[in-house]
Amino acid sequence: MKALYSRLFRLVRRLHGDRSGASLVEFAIVAPIFLLLLAGIVELGSAMNQSIIVASAARAGVEYGAQNLVTAEDVSGMVSAAIADGGNEPGLSATASYACTCADGSASTCLDTDCSSSYRIVRVTVTATDAFAPFLTVPGAPDVFSLTQTAIREVSI
């Protein structure tokens, strides 16, 4: 019986002591997980960067329109300012509008004769939109995401 235990002990010791190739196996298990995590971080950074570009374009358009009453009515100028701020982003598009209300809450048609009992408030709105196509696609997830940012500002009268 003692000989059996002795042989079993030597066998376990020999198997336990043999570590050749263990780090290669560990690397083979961890490397795909690490690469997937790294790709996800790069993808998220790319999406955040494109979202910042879209938000900046919307702000640039609304800043142009909020300068005065003349630029508030220049819808094409607001759109041009937004697109120009987007740089060379190929799918970037923008829409702009302006609206008026009276300070007392009544409706206004943006005419000078409106708001006889209070003053007129003019707001400009620019919405910038771009499509984000991830490098990696996930089954069940859309291939393209729409990034939309809206900026609203009151015009200084």
Image (cartoon, rainbow, N blue to C red):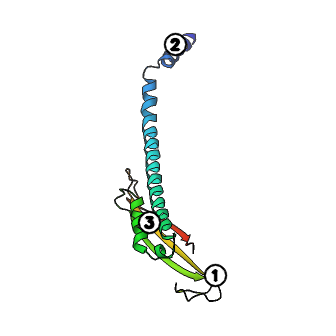
Residue annotated with mark 3: 128
Res 103 label = 1
Which residue occupies the foreground of this view, 39 or 57?
A: 57
Q: Is residue 35 above or below residue 126?
A: above
Q: Amino acid at mark 3?
A: Ala
Rounded to the nearest angstrom, the CA distance separating label 3 from label 2 is: 73 Å
Task: Count every numbered label the image shows and give the total.
Answer: 3
Nearest to N terminus: mark 1 or mark 3: 1
In terms of secondary structure, where does tag 1 sit? loop
Kind of residue at disc 1: Ala
Q: Residue at x 50, y 16 (%)?
A: 17
Crowding near pointer 3: few (<14 within 10 Å), some, many (20+)?
many
Please state which of residues 112 and 14 is positioned toward the viewer in this rendering: 112
- Image marks 3 and 2: residues in contact by CB distance under 8 Å: no
99 to the left or right of 77:
right
Residue name at image x 41 percent, y 59 percent: 86
- Report the front residue among 28 and 99: 99
Query: Label 2 sits on what residue type?
Result: Arg
> Which residue is under mark 2?
10
* Residue with the most extreme left position: 90
| Marks 1 and 2 in Cβ contact (< 8 Å) | no
Q: In the image, residue 38 lies at what x, y percent?
A: 45, 41
Q: Is residue 75 above or below residue 24?
A: below
Quarter of the image where one finds residue 106: bottom right
Instruction: Give residue 146's position: percent from left, percent from top.
Output: 42, 63
